[in-house]
Amino acid sequence: MTIIEPEKKKILIVEDDEALIPALHEVCDKANLAVFEAKNGVSGIVLALQEHPDLILLDILMPVMDGWEMLKQVRESGDWGKCVPVVILTNLSADEDAQIRHIADLGPSFFLTKADWKIESVIDKVVDILNTPKVQCP
Amino acid sequence: MKIRTKINIGFLTTFILVVAVIGFTIDLYATNLVKTNISSYLTSSNHARAEHIRTFLQDQKTTASILAAASVYRDFLTTPTTSSQYKLVKDKIDKRLVRTLAVDTQIAEAFILDTMGQVVASSDKTQEGKDKSTDPYFLNAQKQTYIKDIYFSQTTNALNYDVAAPVFDDNGTFLGVSVLRYLPNLFFSIIDNENGLGNTEENFLINRELFLISPARFLGTESILKQKIETQNARNCFDPAESAYVEKNGYSGVIKTFGSQVVQAKDYRNVDVIATHSYIPETGWCLITKGDIADLFSFRLTMLLVLLGILVTAGVVFFIVGLVVSKRITKPIRLLQDGTREIERGNLDISIDVHTQDEVEDLAVSFNTMASTVKQSRADIEKKVEEQTHELAKKANELEDQKSAILNILDDVKKEKETTELLAHDLEKFKLAVDNASDHVIITDKEGMMLYGNKAVEKITGYKAEEAIGKKAGALWKMPMPTEFYKEFWHTIKDEKKTFIGEIQNKRKNGEIYTAAISVSPILEENGDIRFFVGLERDVSKEKEVDRAKSEFISLASHQMRTPLTAINWYSEILLEEDSGKLNKKQKVYFDAIATAGKQMGDIIKSFLHILHLESGTIAVHPVVIDIVKNIRATIKESQFEIEKKKITVSENYQDALPPLTTDAEIVHVVLQNLITNAVKYAPDGGQVDVSLKKVAEGDMVGEKKVEKGALAVSVHNNGFSISVADHDKIFGKFFRSEAAKKWDPNGNGIGLYMSKKMVDLAKGDIWLESVEGQGVTFYLLLPLDAK
């Protein structure tokens, strides 16, 4: 059982690419975040509802349940789900029609293309969001 | 027809019409009036007579009952024959009976019946002892007075009617019946009285069995009780409701209750009559009064004859007056007519003498003037004809000359025709070529009405060329396009008179939708007016389908490539951070190389995706207000590493107080990035890059181009190798690289400028290059102030 220090912010990483998880885990540790991991949308939603993380780092293309479906369920789960900041981290292009529609519907805070972003920049963004006082969510 | 005759006939016709209408009206009115009078007269006369009859009958009934109440009757009937008094009593009654006859000559016989109906006393002794117990006057008169219908009596050998009254004692016990047998002569004279209405009027009575019981005018007395009268009046008279009413109320109000009893019908002679009736309740008879219609209305004929007389007399008078009047009116007209005939014969010296002091006189004066004018004109015309004949002779000569000239022209025209036929032959060849072309070719007039379509029209659209010819081009197969498209289309081909090239969606006859690349060019007359439009259309659906498949593939491939690339990038980055262990120098250099290669690969993939979206048209422009100077500076900063490495001098020159620029931020960034990285990349070591930005207005020059509307102009110059003019346009093509560029850097991918050009087009800007041998290259970028 992981003992979580109370002041630590919780981040949930939902990512199916085994190669990328350690890298993300490492930078999150470095940024002093409590990390939870899920390898698809289904385990992602279970962990999300159980832990109510402060931020979700979410891949799109995943087996079992994709990121958009999971985000939809999180948004519909209640007050916490409606407001939790979500950063989409994917290699799909943001300018594809399907993605644009989902972005408009589900309102993630950011939509980042993995290959174009340094991991350092990704984590800076995450920390930025966590440190920003919560504005009223829609 | 002569006017005179017309006037006469007109007068006469009008007169006859008027008289006929008046006559008809009078006749109708008079007939109606008389009819009403006759009706009312008949009714009142009939009622009066009926009243008279009733009174007469009632008197006789009263007489009978008074007689019956006499003590002589009672004494006689109460004294038995065996009594000693009987003889005295019998003698007394006999005397009374005889006296009764003497008093009233109409009474033929008076007799008495006892309670058994036996004649116990009579003025005619032969009758005594006879049994009358079944006779109606015995049966009906036991309680009240009764009048027996007229009948033929064997005893008196005449027509009789009987009035019978019962005899009672003081206690009201029935003792017998007193009967008075009447002769009807006096009674008939009441009925027979004439009313003074013509020769056919008569009154007669009928009984309940409809037998005639009084003499009728046209039948002898012998018909009484033999002739049956079955007319409508007879039937109405014995109508139970009507007879009951009369019995109770008399005749007043009977018309009001049952309507007029005057009817038009056939009588017993089968002659048309007007008749009415009254019911006589005392005896159950009916009095009928009637007259022949022909008789009653005989006045009508007289009246018509009088009218006719008036008509004829007046007609004759009118005719004579008309003759005189019309002769006076038409005389001057006839004079005019004679004059006209004279002129017809050629006598123009005529003058008419009319003094009627009206329009006809005016006409005659005009006529005389005309005659003299005509005389004058004839003289003039003769003179003119002579002149013109002369002129004609002259013209005939000229015509002869012209004829030979025309023959020469005809010769020329023949030659021209041969040339045209040759041309038509050429056109035929052209048509054959076009007919079988695989692209759809149509020719329209300047309004876009289709004149020609080749075979490919049917192959592509499914509609036969013949179906489409005569309609607006594309009317059958085009799909609705945005208004701007059509505006642009017509502007290009009609106003600018240039070729329009574009892509549209069409619909085949079978409903299938396809994409067509079209090119429409105006064909101009020598004076520059549009004569035709020639439209070429190619079905590019298949190419589009291939494009789409390609795009999908690239999209998927890019994602698949990016995934492992991410791992490479992130781990080389983490390793270079040295958190997971110190790297030696060599290791650091190698990981750097990996990181750089990874970034390049990411850029290439990103470019591919950009092009993909550009080509499929899925990139949308989102214009926002941007700070262009800040953008340029940031872009230069991205190449800082290279700039420093190659020791390149960058000079920046930005105009102050620039207007705000509204355009797509991403597009501007990608284009600037391409221009600046290229400038740095192709500049020699220690070379020079100049970046400048200024505002330009319409008509200003940017490089060698004239600006068409207000914009911001960016120029990026380097002093590297120059680019030959032949390559200036090609350089913006896909995957094109100039020979010099290939030599300089073999690793370029040839898509940067292609992508930039596409993006600048989207932002409604312009991009081009200018290069002078030995002075490097300048790229110009024009961005409209508002890309909306």
Image (cartoon, coloured by chain):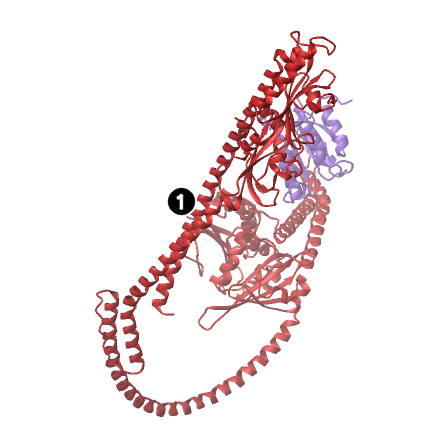
Chain colours: A purple, B red
Determine the residue positioned at 61% across, 17% down: B96
**Residue at the top extreme of this rendering:** B171
Determine the residue positioned at 62% across, 15% down: B68
Residue B630: x and y in percent read 49, 43
Name the amino acid, label 1. Ala
Q: Residues within 10 Å of mark 1 (few under 14, many from 20)?
A: few
Viewer-closest of A3 and A79: A79
Q: Is residue B31 above or below residue B328?
A: above
Residue A62: x and y in percent read 75, 38
Residue A64: x and y in percent read 78, 36
Q: Is residue B159 visible?
A: yes
Q: Assign a secondary structure to mark 1.
A: loop
* Chain where mark 1 sits: B
Left or right, A2 with respect to B228, comes to right
Pointer 1 residue: B657
Q: Quadrant of residue B406?
A: bottom left
Left or right, A124 with respect to B382, comes to right
Q: Is residue B696 visible?
A: no
Viewer-closest of B766 and B206: B206
The N terminus of chain B, quarter of image: bottom left
Left or right, B64 with respect to B532, comes to right
